[in-house]
Amino acid sequence: MELLEVLARRRSVRRFKPLPIPEEDLEKLLFALQRAPTDASAQLYSVVRVKDQALRDEIARLSGDQEHIRQAAEFFVLLADIHRLERLLAHRGQRMAPWPRTALHFAILDAGLAGAYLALTAEALGYGVCFIGGVLNGVEALVDLLGLPPGVLPVAGLAVGVPDEEGPPRPRLPRRLVVHEDRYRPYTEADLEEAYQAMAPYSRVGDWNRVLRRYFAEGGTMEERERPYGRALARQGFDPDLPQGAPFYSLGALVEEALEEGRGVLFRRGEAWLERETEAFRGEGRPGEALYTALRKARGEIPGWP
Ligand SMILES: Cc1cc2nc3c(=O)[nH]c(=O)nc-3n(C[C@H](O)[C@H](O)[C@H](O)COP(=O)(O)O)c2cc1C
């Protein structure tokens, strides 16, 4: 099929026939994955092709029990990956710079582009695909399940298979609300109303706001994901303020937890103290590292006095 025709017709597929993808097509999909552009040639992504059905079941369960994860012929987990880059530099005797935020930016982009190239190629070959952001629902467990080293983070899943559903393409926002000319144009109330009207067919009951509210308003899915995701970032070494492995959403969250367990927290250059009524626990290093050590001492997780 011609590319523009594929784009015009494509829609995410969530029902698949129980048919495999032949080796020669799988080869094309993985070829497309690797042909995607990548920042500075670094290829800051990996994918895990999940072949083991028990593992697939567990990932489906962790991702909100999405049945299409189980049904699809193939399921990939797209990963932001700076671990391999760190190894490549170390192999030549160099240390990687501290750049966790920028690394995350480019690694997620690389993983997304590679996934999109694979997905579009699959659609051009007549397969159906569905990206799965739901893998973030259980992101901490997924890190364990896939054995991800520091520097590697799940970005999204990608289900690919033979479609068992048809339907029209889903709506999009009016182009002028998405494509700005020269400068970002502020949105008027009328623009926002137009957006809701254009997107109404997206929802079965004709109200796109129901979808947005469920995901993005207070108490929605994204808010639920936020803290576990932050903890996964710190654990995998993508938080510049916390030592790699610290199970905290942020430095602020670590301070709050330390204050709940003690009477006060004191920072000095190169050290932090966690005070209780009759004792104080000391940690060394940058603020996050120092306080994390002090808290672990207070909890009896590591020996050391003070
Ligand atoms: C990053 C990302 C995450 C997504 N996560 C899910 C998901 O967890 N489950 C699902 O069924 N669809 C998921 N989708 C599919 C979107 O819901 C879909 O692309 C969107 O509603 C537009 O519909 P269309 O792709 O049919 O045009 C995801 C898509 C993207 C790009």
Image (cartoon, rainbow, N blue to C red):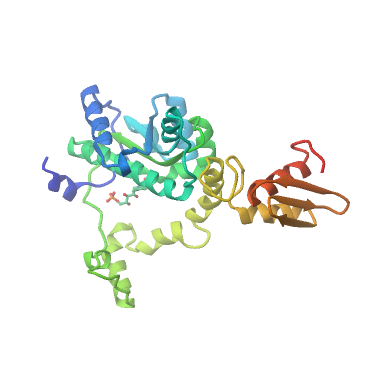
**Residue found 19% across the figure and 36% down from its top:** 126
Instruction: Estimate the x, y position of residue 261 in percent, counting from the top left.
Output: 76, 51
Figure quadrant of residue 173: bottom left
- In the figure, is residue 75 to the left or right of 298? left
Q: Nearer the viewer, residue 218 or 30?
A: 30
Quadrant assignment for the C terminus? top right
Whether residue 282 is situated above or below residue 171 in the rendered picture: above
**Residue found 30% across the figure and 63% down from its top:** 200
Quadrant assignment for the N terminus? top left
Whether residue 222 is situated above or below residue 68 in the rendered picture: below
Instruction: Estimate the x, y position of residue 225 in percent, counting from the top left.
Output: 51, 50
Q: Nearer the viewer, residue 80 or 54?
A: 80
- In the figure, is residue 285 to the left or right of 230? right
Whether residue 255 is situated above or below residue 97 in the rendered picture: below
- The residue lying furthest to the left in this view is 2
Instruction: Estimate the x, y position of residue 150 in percent, counting from the top left.
Output: 51, 36
